[in-house]
Amino acid sequence: MSSLKECSIQALPSLDEKTKTEEDLSVPWKVIVLNDPVNLMSYVVMVFRKVFGYNENKATKHMMEVHQLGKSVLWTGQREEAECYAYQLQRWRLQTILEKDD
């Protein structure tokens, strides 16, 4: 006698595939840097200038927001570009997150 059991074929679940519309994909994203106790203020200013091309005043303003408020929104735009900026900031060892813009 065979030890194989007879398998019943069950109906496969139906897939409800939905494609995101162009509107959904173009929702703006925010690049946010969080405060950390490790990096020097001058280092953070230097990183903002290198990554975003900010002048000294704008970079210092964002650094002070991070220092005093715990975070600063550095850039808002399409997700792919936001991910690129977040990656660059993380490579410089800055704590960075992305959030959908309201």
Image: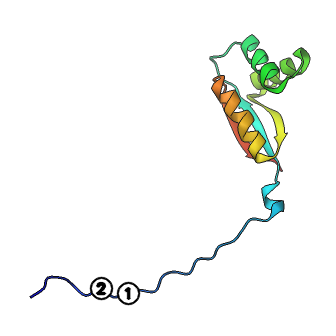
Query: Which of the two residues, 79 or 35, is positioned nearer the viewer here?
Result: 79
Query: Which of the two residues, 91 or 98, is positioned nearer the viewer here?
Result: 91
Q: Is residue 59 left or right of residue 6?
A: right
Q: Residue at x 78, y 57 (%)?
A: 25
Confirm or deny contact between disc 1 and disc 2 (CB under 8 A): yes
Q: Is residue 37 left or right of residue 101?
A: left
Which residue, as the protein is rendered here, is positioned at the far front?
A: 2
Position above or below: 100 against 25? above
Quadrant including the N terminus: bottom left
Crowding at label 2, few (<14), some or many (≥20) Cα neighbours within 10 Å?
few
Crowding at label 1, few (<14), some or many (≥20) Cα neighbours within 10 Å?
few
In percent of width and height, residue 47 lies at 75, 19
Task: Assign a secondary structure to mark 2.
Answer: loop
Position above or below: 14 against 21? below
The total of numbered circles placed on residues is 2
Q: Which mark is residue 9?
A: 1
